[in-house]
Amino acid sequence: MPVKIAPSILSADFGRLAEEVRAIGSADYVHVDVMDGHFVPNLTIGPVVIEWVKKATQLPLDVHLMIEDAERWVAAYAKAGADLIGVHVEACPHLHRTLAQIKDLGKKPCVVLNPHTPASAIEVILPDVAQVLVMSVNPGFGGQSFIRSSLDKIRQLRRMIDERGLSVDIEVDGGIKTDNIAEVAAAGADVFVSGSGVFATNDYAATIAELRKRGTAARG
């Protein structure tokens, strides 16, 4: 199975966002980072912008909520056009309830782990999610370097998912580029978020194709 590529529009040119989104049409998802300035030290976009992104693409929107009180906002992001909605285990005291809420809205529930959070923190809710997002940088800013200890976490999650016979994707976000995607894919990841790794290149389609090629080859 080919790996999936999800360019993060956090690194796009927001002055021409619709054009940028259309230019990554060969990807598998559009990854949208939502930050509230509280859970992470940055402030980005809200549901209104997501509505416009949805109009510019046929790709599913992979919306990553780096926000406090996520349960108060999932309905608004679902209505705006999110297809997958990711919430942080660190920000959701009633995680099972929030994931069930996302599913009840007809969206794919995803759970997100910060670099310091062990894979074991989500073991009991793995059957309730479509995807696990491993943060391989500290969330809040684009353009950071990949944290190598994330590889062990990805391997642990791969074993946990496979041993239970679950259909759950492992997504990785942070520092993913053409020169390291093979190693991360070999560890067991399925979906790769890349911001500057795509948007800082001259040919988005060629970069997406190369990421997919290298990642898929490493998965065997």
Image (cartoon, rainbow, N blue to C red):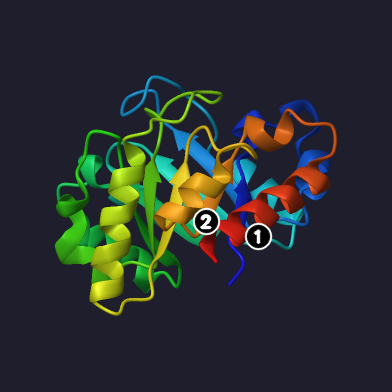
Instruction: Give the numbered dot on residue 217.
Output: none
Residue 100 at what x, y percent from top left?
A: 28, 68
Q: As displayed, is residue 55 above or below residue 195?
A: below
Q: Earlier in the sequence, mark 2 or mark 1?
A: 1
Residue 99, how many percent across, how many down?
A: 29, 62
Left or right, 52 with respect to 119, comes to right
Residue type of the residue flagged with mark 2: Val
Instruction: Say what secondary structure mark 2 lies in.
Output: strand
On the rendered structure, is 64 left or right of 24?
Answer: left
Nearest to the observer: residue 148 or residue 101: 148
| Residue at horizontal 29 percent and vertical 68 percent from the top | 161
Residue labelled with disc 1? 28
Is there CB contact under 8 Å for labels 2 and 1? yes
Callout 1: helix, strand or loop? loop
Name the quadrant of the N terminus: bottom right
Looking at the rendered structure, the kind of residue marked 1 is Asp
Residue 20 appears anywhere in the view:
yes
Is 214 displayed left or right of 64 in the figure? right
